[in-house]
Amino acid sequence: MTVNVSMRVNGRAVNAAVEPSTLLVEFLRTGLQLTGTHVGCDTAQCGACTVLVDGRAVKSCNVLAAQVEGAEITTIEGLAAEDGTLHPMQAAFKECHGLQCGFCTPGMVMTSIDLVQHHPHGTEREIRAGLEGNFCRCTGYQNIVRAVQQGAQAMKQGA
Amino acid sequence: MNAPAAGFIGQSVKRKEDYRFLTGNGQYTDDVVLPGQTYASFVRSPYAHARIRGIDTSAARAATGVVAVFTGADLAAVGGLPCGWLITSTDGTPMKEPKHALLAEDKARHVGDQVAVVIADTPANAKAAAALVEVDYEELTPVVDPATAKGAAGVVHDMAPDNVCYTWAIGDKAATDAQFAAAHHVTRLEFRNNRLIPNAIEPRAANAAYNRSDDSWTVYVANQNPHVERLLMAAFVLGIPEHKLKIIAPDVGGGFGSKIFLYAEETVLVWASKKINRPIKWTAERSESFLTDAHGRDHVTVAELAMDKNGTFLGMRVDTTANLGAYLSTFASSVPTILYATLLAGQYTTPKIHCQVTGVFTNTAPVDAYRGAGRPEATYVVERLVETAAKEMGIDPAEIRRRNFIRSFPYPTPVGLTYDVGDYEAHLARAQALADVAGFAQRKAASAAKGLLRGIGYSCYIEACGLAPSNIAGALGARAGLFEAGEVRVHPTGKVTVFTGSHSHGQGHETTFAQVVADKLGIPIDDIDIVHGDTGKILFGMGTYGSRSLAVGGTAIVKAVDKIVAKGKKIAAHLLEAADTDIEFENGVFKVSGTDRNVPFASVALTAYVPHNYPLDKLEPGLNENAFYDPTNFTYPSGSYVCEVEVDPETGVVRVDRFTAVDDFGNIINPMIVEGQVHGGLAQGLGQALLEHGVYDSDSGQLLSGSYMDYAMPRADDLPSFTVETMKGTPCSHNPLGVKGCGEAGAIGSPAALINAVCDALGVKDVPMPATPHTVWKALQQRGA
C-alpha cells in the first residue's frame, strides 16, 4: 500500500507515491536523490538530517514524508543561488572553517539559518544552546559558532 | 582566489573541498546506489558470550525480497580478519591470535557480534528478514571487566584460557626498581583510562559490486586507508587477486581511527557480491556503530613516580591492563604497547622507566586506535603523576616540570624513542602567559565569593607522530611498511593532478597538499587537484592515521615535485639551449642562471607532451613522477595546555572556564586548518575527561551506553571557546617541510589538564574520568567537604 504525497522541495513541486512508513529523509535521499541530507543516528539526536520545513529546522529522520504534505521543504541543495553563489550562512561556514569532514554540515547549516532567523542577535552562549540538537565530532564547535555569528551579520545585511 | 599566487605555505587558504560539502554535493558511501543494488542487514548476537547451537534461516530465506542469507558455516573456509602488529610476550611467546571470523562460527563473543547476514532488495526487507533468523544460543559466562579478566571464570577464546593475549614490557626493571629504592618520595596513582566510542558522525558503510565481465570487484567503503583495506582483504582474508579488487573510499564523514580497520561487514559484502552477482550495500545504524565500531582506550593502570628531594624525577613504574575486547582488531595489539609505553618519558629526563602491559580479551567490542591511540593514555599517566607529585612535594606544578624538562636534543629516552627537536620551556611559558596564570588567585577568590571552587591544571604532552620509520616499526612487530606514496601528474597545459596515498576525511588535504605543490611549482592553487581514496587511481598508500598525512604523505608529494622540477630543468635546458646545470627554477619559471632567458612551467609541460623540439635521445616525453617516502624517525609534536575549571560543590557540575593550548607542530602550512584540528582534538579530549564513557553491564556484558541518549557526546554548549596558539616552534629536523603533525594533539594533551584542574579545585588526589557531576559530587563527599 502506498500513499500519495505532494510538497515543494527547493522550490520545485514534487508528487510521489510512497510507503506510509517512509521517513522524510528517506524520501529526500532515495526518492529525490537529494543525498546532501545525511543520516547520522537512529534516535533523532545528531541533527545531520535537519532540513527546513516551512522555514523551521526539522530533523527529517523523525518525520514521515506523509506528515509534510503540502509543505515547503528546503534542503542543503536548495540554498545556493542559481549561479552557484553560496547563501550567506554557507559562505560563513567556509570563511570561518566551520566544517571539516562535511557530514554534519548540511544539518548544521540548516539549523543555523533557522536559529539566526528567529534569534538574529544571539550571544555566543545562546548560539551554543541553539546548536544543541546537532552533533559535530570534528570541529569542537568553536568555528561553527563563529560562522553562525558571521552568517547572522551577512544575512542581516542581505535582508 | 583568496591567497597570493606564490608563497602559499603558511597561509590560511580557505578550503577547496568546502564548496561541495556546503552545497550537498559531497559523495559519501551511502550516497552511492549501483544498478541492481541489494542491501544487507546483519543478524547480531544479543548476548555478550554465547555458544551458537544452531541457526535456522528458512523463514528469512522465504521472506519478501530476500536474495540470500549466509551464516558462519558458509564462510568456514574463509580466513579470519588479520591483526597487523605482532606483539611478543616477555617470555618470548607470540601474542595469542584467535581467529576473528567474518560471521561467528562456534560462539558469539560480544553483544553485536555478527552471526548471519541477510541480503534483500530493499533495506527494510533485509532488516525485516534478519529478524526472522532464529539462532539457538546457549548463554555462557561473560568476561566484562578488564581488571578481573585474567583468570576470570569465563574464557573468551580457548587458545587463551586465562584471557591474556600477551604480557609485554619495556624498560630496565631492575634499574628502575633501584631508583625507587633510593627515592626521597614516590607518588602513586591507580586509575582507569575510560573506554570511549569514536562516533564519527558518518556511520560505517560499504557497497560492494562484483564485475563478472573481468572477474573483479569495486568496493565503496568509509575507510581511512583504502590500499591497506585492499591488501588485507584480498591477500589475508578472501584470497582474491589484489589487482582485481578496487577500493574507493570517497568522501568519508570522520574517522578518528575507527575507519582504519578492516571490518567483517565490508569483507562479507565483497565475498557475497560474487555469490549473488549483484552489488550489496550496508550502512550501519548508529546502534550498530556503538556495538561494533572498534572502541578506544580502556586501560586499568597503576603508576608510580620516584623523585629526589628536589623533585627531580628518578624513575617511573607503570603496570597497565589493556582491554583488547573480544577479537584483535587490525592494530589493536600495538596501541597499548608500542604507541603507549614508548611515550612515558613525556617531556622529561626521567632516567629509568619500566612499563608492563597485559593485554586481555573480554566479551566487549574490539578496542583499537582512537584519536591519539596510546599516546593520550601515556600522557594521562605522565601528566597526572607529575601534577600529583608537585602537590605532594609542595612544588609549583609548572616549576616541577621545568626542573625535569629535556633541554638537549637529540634526546634518547629510556623507552626506545629519540626525540629530534623540541623547546618545552618556550610553550610552557607562552601558555602560562596566555592563560593569565598570574591572575588565577584573584579569579579563585572571586569564584569562592560565589560559593564555587576554582582549579587550574597543566598538561605538557609529547606525541610520536608521522608513523613511521618502517625499519623501526618492523623491529617492533609491525607486519607492514609505513611509508607513503605520491604521484604528481603535470598535464600538457601545465595543470596538475596530485595522487596521494593519504586519505582526507576532514583534515583538508585537498587544500593543504595543493598549497605545498602550488608553492613548490609556483602555479595557482586552482590549477592543482588532489586525488585520494581510490586504489584504481592511486599507485599505493598506507593511509591516514597517527597524524602522518603531511609529514609522510606530504613529503612523498614533495619528492615527486622535486623529480618534476629536475626533469623540467632538462627540458628547459634544451629549449633554452643551455646546460642542464645552468637552469634555475623559481616562481614557476625556468631560467638560465644569470640571464633573462626563461621559459614558463606551462611551456615546459606542453613541450613534454608535444615533443617536436625535444631531446628524445636523452629524455622520455611526458611529465609525470611518483615517489615513495619512508621517514627516518617519528616526529615529536609537543605542547603545554592549561585548563581552568569552576566547580559547583552543590551539584558537582564542572564548567571549563578557560582552556589554553600552545602547540609546537614545527612548520605550519595552513594555520586555519591546524587550529581547527586542535579545536576538534580538544573537544574529544575534554569529551573523554568530562562526559564520554563506554559502559558495559558488569554482569550481562550489555552495552549500557549504546545510543546518543546514553553516551554523552560533547554538544556545542558543553564546551568553551578555546585559546589556541601554534608557536613558531622547532621544525622537524628530518622531513623537508619541517612539519610534525597536528591531528591528535588536542585529544592527547587535554584530558590530564582537565582532571588536574578538577583535582586542584576539589583539593583531592584523584577524580576518575569522566568527571561527571555525580563523580565529582561523590569525590567531594568522600573528601568530607
Image (tube, coloured by chain):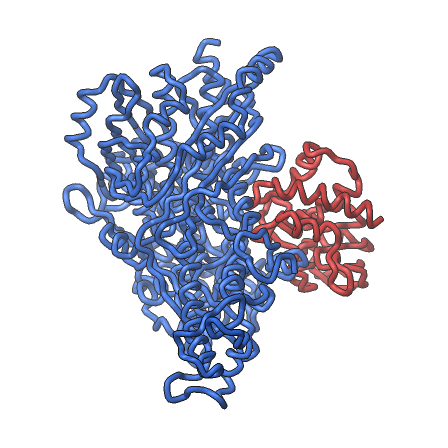
Chain colours: A red, B blue
Q: Residue furthest front?
A: B594
Q: Quadrant of the N terminus of chain B?
A: bottom right
Q: Tell me if I can see residue B330 in this picture.
A: no
Q: Give the residue displayed 40% in from the left and 22% down from the top.
A: B397
Compare residues B60 and A42 and report the one nearer the observer.
A42
All told, the count of numbered labels is: 0
Q: Give the residue displayed 52% in from the left and 77% down from the top.
A: B597
Q: Tell me if I can see residue B259 in this picture.
A: yes
Residue B127 relative to residue A66: left or right:
left
Compare residues A6 and B262 and report the one nearer the observer.
B262
Position in image of residue A124 (x %, y %): 69, 34
Position of residue B351 relative to residue B585, above or below, is above
Position of residue B205 relative to residue B606, above or below, is above
Residue B253 relative to residue B550: left or right:
right
Position in image of residue B242 (x %, y %): 36, 71
Compare residues B474 and B366 and report the one nearer the observer.
B474
Q: Residue furthest right?
A: A159
- Residue B303 is drawn in which quadrant? top left
Compare residues B701 and B572 and report the one nearer the observer.
B572
Position in image of residue B125 (x %, y %): 56, 60
Position in image of residue B309 (x %, y %): 27, 17
Q: Give the residue displayed 42% in from the left and 37% down from the top.
A: B195
- Residue B421 is drawn in which quadrant? top left
